[in-house]
Image (spheres, grey):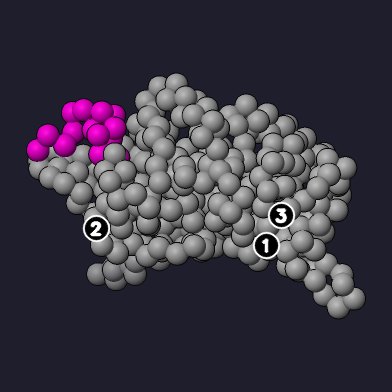
Amino acid sequence: MAVQWFPGHMHLTKKTIEERIKHIDVVIEMVDARLPGSSANPMLASLTSKRPSLKVLNKQDLADPGCTALWLAHYNGREGTRAIALDTTDGNAAKRLIAPCRELAPTRGNSMARPLRVMICGIPNVGKSTLINRLVGKSAAKAADEAGVTRNEQRIVLEDGFYLFDTPGMLWPRIIVAQSGYNLAASGAVGRNAFDDQEVALELLDYLKPHYATELVARYALKDIDALQSEELLEAIGRNRGSLMAGNKVNMQKAAELLIHDFRVGALGRISLETPQEYARWLAEGKQLDAERQLRKEELQSAGHIRTKPAAKKSAPPKAIPRPRKPVR
C-alpha cells in the first residue's frame, strides 16, 4: 500500500529533531504495541542512531500479550536499547519511563548542572500526548484519537535534573513495506484521506482470519469462516451488524469502517498485527522491491523514456563593480 502523507509541519518536525538531537542524552520512541515494527519511524532511527534509545510499546492493553513479549525481547536484545510496554490510561505506569532513561545515561541527571535531557518521539496517534499528560498530571499536550494533533515542540520538567522534550508525531515520506502501510492505516496513524477503508479492511481480515479466527467468530456471530474469502467475510460482518442499503445489500464501506473501528478500540480482543519475524520478512521484501523499482527507473531514464529533472544552474557570482579611477593630476 503506497502511503504518501507528509504534511508541512512534519518537515518542520524533522528539522527540529535534527537540531535538538545534538543536545539530547536519551531518545524515547513510542510505538504501537499492536504493530511495533510498522510504527517505528526509520527516518527517526537515522536521525537518532547515535543516542541510547528507550522503546515504549504503548497500548499494550490492546495488543496480544504473547506478541508483545516477543517484541520486548527483540528490542532488549539490542545494544544501547531498552524496551518497556505501557498502557497510558494507567497513571502510575507512565512513571516507569524515568528509571530506564537514567540507566541508559548514567552520567547525566545527577545535578541541575548536568540534567538528563530526553526527547520523546513517535508517529501520529500512538498515544504520546496522553502519556505526557499523565506524566505531568495535567493537559500539557493536546491529545486526540486522530493523526497529527501535536504541532509544536515543548519542554517538560518531570523531576529535578530530568528534562523531557516533546515533539509532534512524524511519519516518513515513503513507506516501502506494503503491509506496514495497511497496518498503520488500520491503527489510525495516517489520515483517512491517505487510504481506502475497504482495501484496509480486507487486508486486516487477511491477517485476522488465520491468526484470530476465534475473535472474529465471537464478535460478529459468524459461522464457517474458513470457507469465506475476505470479501465474503467482510460482507458477512456487515450483514450481521446491520450495515445494509436498499434492496438488502450490504454497505461495504460501512462494514469496513465498522471492522476498523472495532480493531482500534479493542472490541475484537487483544490483537497484534505482526511479530518480529514477520516484520523482518516484510522489510526484506520491501527493500528488494524498492531496489528493483529504482533499478527499472534508472534503466528507463538511461533509455530516455523518463525525462529527468535538469539540475538547477548555479547563479554566477556578481561581477565586481570597478572603483572609479582617481583623476591623474
Tell me which numbered mark, 3 or 1, is placed earlier along the sequence. Answer: 3
Q: Amino acid at mark 1?
A: Leu
Asked whether 242 or 54 is in front, the reply is 242
Q: Does residue 267 show up?
A: yes
Q: Does residue 99 belong to the magenta stretch?
A: yes
CA distance for labels 2 and 3: 39 Å
Relative horizontal placement of residue 65, taking residue 105 as reference (left or right): right
Q: Residues within 10 Å of mark 2 (few under 14, many from 20)?
A: few
**How packed is label 1: few (under 14 Cα within 10 Å), some, or many (20 or more)?**
some
The stretch in magenta equals 97-111
Looking at this view, name the residue that lies furthest to the bottom.
246
Q: CA distance from mark 3 to mark 1?
A: 11 Å
Marks 2 and 1, the one that precedes in the sequence:
2
Residue extending furthest toward the right: 247
Task: Say which quarter of the image contains residue 129.
Answer: bottom left
Q: Quadrant of residue 108?
A: top left
Q: Quadrant of the C terminus?
A: bottom left
Residue at x 69% of width, y 41% of height:
214
Q: Which residue corresponds to mark 3? A: 220
Where is residue 26, by image quadrant?
top left
What residue is disc 2 on? 137
Residue 103 at x, y percent in the picture: 25, 28
Question: Mark 2 or mark 3: which is in front?
Answer: 3
Mark 1 sits on what residue? 258
> Does residue 170 show up?
no
Q: Earlier in the sequence, mark 2 or mark 3?
A: 2
Q: From the viewer's perspective, is residue 137 above or below residue 210?
A: below
